[in-house]
Image (spheres, grey):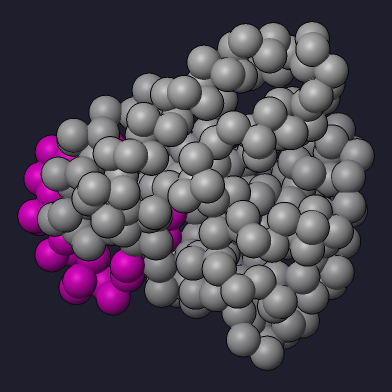
Amino acid sequence: MVYPPLCAQLIVFSRQMEVAANVEQVLDAVKAAGFDAIECGVGLGAEDPRGFARLLDRKGVKIGSFHGGVSTDLSETFRLADIVGVRDLCFSNIGGWENTSADSYLRGIETANYMCEACARRGIHLHYHNHAYEFAPSDRGPSGMELMLEHLDARIDLCVDVAWVHIAGLDPAAFLREHADRVGYVHLKDYTGDRHWVPLGQGVVPLAEVMGAVEELQRARWVAYEQDTSDLPAAEACAQSRRYLAETFGY
């Protein structure tokens, strides 16, 4: 089985501690869990990016992607990306959180296409990270996701968050296969009940089917474990998810 490179999204730590102030501890926890790469917010390490790059190198950890929004400061992001060696940027929130206005989506898409042009000039791959709200019908009928698939620059890949796809009532494995030509990044996430986030394999997301679809992807640059919150210490949640992927899928 051949899967894309794997990283850990640091949001699971950021809900329990100030990541920037404890970055060495966080990197140690990620590495101990078995991850060699992270996904982090665009501002991490901004105060001393060269020092941050040295720390990453010393810990043996790469940054798979930065994560921001449609209002991300691209000039600062590019500066940091060049120093720490990042070539991927995930972003979210086109249309506004749980907005159903087609006009809002189209304005957000216009901004995203501008971002794409700027990223392309710098050799940065841009990926749109979904939540559940984009799958609801807009006030003109088509869903936000349908509007994005139609109007986003084709160079903007999807960062498919499989839990949010599932929450929206869709089959995430089928969605990955249907849009395989647009999937450049995948977020693996699991939950129970009403969006109660849990380590991978402990919830209701059909991850076996998802991983079958992930294995077929030809354009995915990264896969990230993501858990928005955790009842467990973040390091333990991270370790449990990594063990699940290794023991269940040989990943």
Q: Over which residues does the magenta segment extend?
A: 38-62
**Residue 152 at what x, y percent from top left?**
55, 36
In the picture, measured across the screen, residue 75 lies left or right of residue 73, that is left
Residue visible at 84% across and 39% down in the picture: 167
Closer to the camera in the image, 155 or 203: 155
The quadrant in which the C terminus is found is: bottom right
Residue 21 visible somewhere in the drawing: no
Q: How many marks?
A: 0
Q: Looking at the picture, how far across and down is residue 109, in whole percent?
A: 52, 26
Q: Quadrant of residue 128?
A: top right
Q: Nearer the viewer, residue 127 or 21?
A: 127
- Determine whether, in the image, residue 62 is placed left or right of residue 196: left
Of residue 96 and residue 106, the one placed in the foreground of this image is: 106
Q: Residue at x 36, y 30 (%)?
A: 114
* Location of the N terminus (image quadrant): bottom right
Q: Is residue 153 left or right of residue 48?
A: right
Camera sees residue 124: yes
Depicted 48 relative to depicted 201: above or below:
above
Percent coordinates x, y for residue 12 in the rendering: 54, 47
What residue lies at 68% left-to-right and 14% top-to-bottom? 102
> Measuring 61% from the left and 55% from the top, which residue is drawn there?
182
Q: Position of residue 13 (x, y in %)?
A: 48, 46
Whether residue 179 is situated above or below residue 100 in the rendered picture: below
Residue 168 on the magenta segment: no
